[in-house]
Amino acid sequence: MRIHRWYKKKKKNDNQQKDNINPEVDDSLESLIKQMKVSNDFIYFKNDQSPQPIHLYYFMSLVDSEIIHRDILPYLNRESLTSLQKLKQELPIENIEITSDVNKIEQKVLRGSIIIQLDKSSTEVALIRAELNKAREVSLPEVEFSVVGPKESFVESLDTNLNLIRKRLPIPELQIAEYSVGKLSKTRVAVVSIEGITNEENVNTVKQRIQAIEFDTINDSSYIVQLITDNKNSPFPQLIDTERPDRIASVLAEGKVAILVDGAPHGILGPTTFIEFFSAFEDYFLNWITASFFRLIRLFAVIFSILITPIYVAVLTYHYELIPKDLVSILVISRREIPLPPILEAIFLEIAIELLREAGARLPTKVGQTIGIVGGIVIGTASVEAGLTSNVLLIIVALAALASFTTPVYKMGNTIRLIRFPFLIFAHFWGLLGVAICFCFTITHLLKLTSLGRPFLEPIFPPRISDLKDAVIRLPFNFQAKRPIQLQTEDTMRFKQNKAKDKREIDE
Amino acid sequence: MKAMQRKVNERYMITASLVFFLIHSMQIGIGILSYQQDIVKSAGNDSWIAVIFAGLIVHIIIWMMYKILKNGKGDLITIHYDLFGKWLGGIFSLIWIIYYWAIGLVVIRSYLEVVQVWMFPDISIWQFSLIFLSLVYYLLIGGFRVVTGICFLGVVIPAYLLLTLIFPIEFTEFRNLLPIWNHSLKDISLATKDMTLSYLGLSTLLMFYPYLKNPERSQKWAHGGNLLTMLLYAGLMILSIAYFGQGYLSRIIWPTLTMWKIVELPFVERFEYVGISSWALIILPNICLSFWAASRGVRQLLRFSQRKALIGMLLMTWIIIYFLQERQQIEMLSSYVSMTGFYLIVIYLPLLFVFSYLRLLRR
């Protein structure tokens, strides 16, 4: 409790501090320029050739020199240029701002605008946008790859990403609210929603939480996820991040809120449910029967991946009687020469797999693959031959690892691999009972979670049967006319449901 | 000092239909593993009739409870306060609170006993109960919504255990049930009385009633929950009599567990290990709901922090569990609590019902 209070006090102090990093600088344009001139990439340039001398200031590293050379400089030599208003008419660039607000000038110039000043002593300047936009080309989705369907994914530029979404939803109701987050990074964060569909409360929750963020640099959308998520002490992700614009467009239409962050190739979606983490977007490209089958497989894979090693440990430590006669001989043969108790055997192999995965993820792709294969085969076989682990466990652990990779959302896959370890420890102490207790802990935790204030375990609890249409199995599209209750949308119908539901008579 | 809460914030309320699971999960617990023995001793092959009678009696009690709660507008504690005043009402409330708490204690200790007998003879009781009670604490600080959640999942997830009842069917002899009604009314009513004990968990309804959205509409769900319990008990009773025969059945302590011994799957033998482990999820709602009701009662009665009351109760439970080592002690405690429950629900509640009606009429 005391720590909590102390923490609160500290927070208050932080708030009192001024946002300005260097409080000594006073607020005049002159001192701003003086401060910026210290950097070598800040250019000051006086155009003497023109009839009226013009002062130009900009950051070389932020502006597109082509815009300056092609669209600005040629027009500055004209004679008619006597005031900033005239300049605004002359230049072939829209949205030229004339202001004397120093804060605004500072903001704009740091985002790649050019300052034009006619008279060195005047405080009024014109700001011309000329920022350099360097971003990766839109490329294939790598994390959420799909065999069929669209193959574009987000890049690190917010404008490109918004363009990818707007192209898919060309409606005026698609609203984008932009915020600047981060004391140092001033990252642009966009909250995207559809007016008339998305629940206002959800949008406001997101907006409030984003505005309340106190942080210095936001380098990726995952920073935002961690800062606005409901329960920060949970290993379970409560907001989905996706790199697919088609997924974002589709769930926006369903009534969710999306968050995009400049500099991040991932969008964030909320509110979401636990089940949604196991639905790949590809499910909507396939026929509903196939899609449902794969979803079931994935769900089974998750349960299998979490429980199989703990069950192995539990059974071999305490409940030998549980295994049928024919199976027990196989286990006995494979474990005959192993000196370690099942828990150590299991932890050894689990950690080996984690190491391989971690090494594979850190190394460059080509090397990573080699490490994965070589490590898997060599270490696996060697440890079996050396008598450190049993064959059966090797199969089980490898299958469990494989199963954990079927989760379409990467962060959820990580969580699943993590929660195996408490299960293992419980299994070691109380056998199957321990597994059950740990399971109870897990579902209690899941019951307590919320995503943007909406229940996380929905549609399982609170049970909402109509939302099951797109949960464990995905029913055909004509069953999906209603938006999920979970999202409490303002317009609950996605499209008009086909009323002709009566069965066709045979041969009529 | 907090005020007595008569209305609950709507944010914490639950849908009426979930009462089905609250009632049902509270009734099915540790009792269903062993209820057959006592009933069969007095009613023999007619036990299933007693099961149905008891279920019908409980239906009437549910109806009464709803009448009391509707008249009283609030939970049991506020009704006591309104009807009997601060002191007398307080004493009645205290008895109920202790009863709720004792249910939780008995359930967790009896479950531990099953675990000791069937799975781990030398499990460390204090370690295990520490972990289990911290699970209960973790769950209860989530509030009533989470408790309801666990009641729901505690019914839905272990439902797969019903499938295991297919295995004994192969070895049943349904002629064991004949002749029907060969016991005297006295025998049957004695069995009915014993059987009522297995249904008693539903009394927590008196505490969570203010948490229901549209409480009027929830009544049919409460009856539905009880109906399912009745069908389960009756079905299992018929199956047990057909499988064991009444003579043998009256001599086994845990017939349901014994039946599991016959289950054999290609990858699992001795299914009772799996069953007992899964049972943790079935008794968890029992324990949570009763501790919730007790701590909520303390909060309402003494206007004390529910969280602190809960910590106190769990600590007390932990200490008592540690000292309850003998089977006789556990049996004794269990039968005391059951008898208290019987008197409170079958005798006291109808009186309360009459009293609240008289009060209403006078007004």
Image (cartoon, coloured by chain):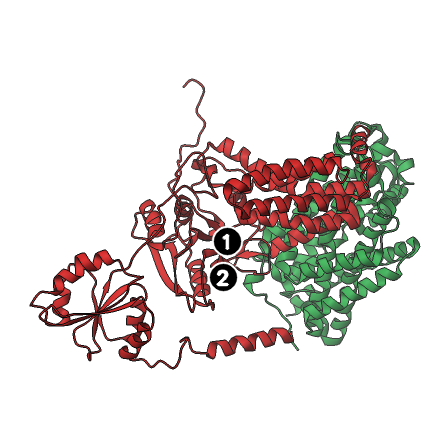
Chain colours: A red, B green
Chain under disc 1: A
Relative horizontal placement of residue A436, taking residue B42 as reference (left or right): left
Say whether mark 1 and mark 2 are on the same chain: yes
Image quadrant where one finds the N terminus of chain B: bottom right
User: At 61% from the left edge and 42% from the top edge, which residue is drawn?
Assistant: A302
Q: Earlier in the sequence, mark 2 or mark 1?
A: 2
Whole-Å distance between the Cαs marked 2 and 1?
Answer: 9 Å
Residue wearing tag 2: A228
Between A127 and A369, the one lying in front of the other is A369
User: At 35% from the left edge and 57% from the top edge, which residue is drawn?
Assistant: A176
Residue A249 position within the rendered picture, expressed as x and y whole percent measured from the top left: 39, 47
Mark 1: few, some, or many residues within 10 Å (few <14, many ≥20)? many
What amino acid is at disc 2?
Answer: Ile
Mark 2: few, some, or many residues within 10 Å (few <14, many ≥20)? many
Q: Based on the displayed image, in which of its 4 quarters is residue B48 positioned?
A: top right
Residue wearing tag 1: A239
Q: In the rendered structure, are the residues bearing label 2 and label 1 in contact, judged by CB atoms less than 8 Å apart?
A: yes
User: At 55% from the left edge and 46% from the top edge, which residue is drawn?
Assistant: A361
Residue A65 position within the rendered picture, expressed as x and y whole percent measured from the top left: 24, 58
What amino acid is at disc 1?
Answer: Leu
Residue A183 position within the rendered picture, expressed as x and y whole percent measured from the top left: 42, 69
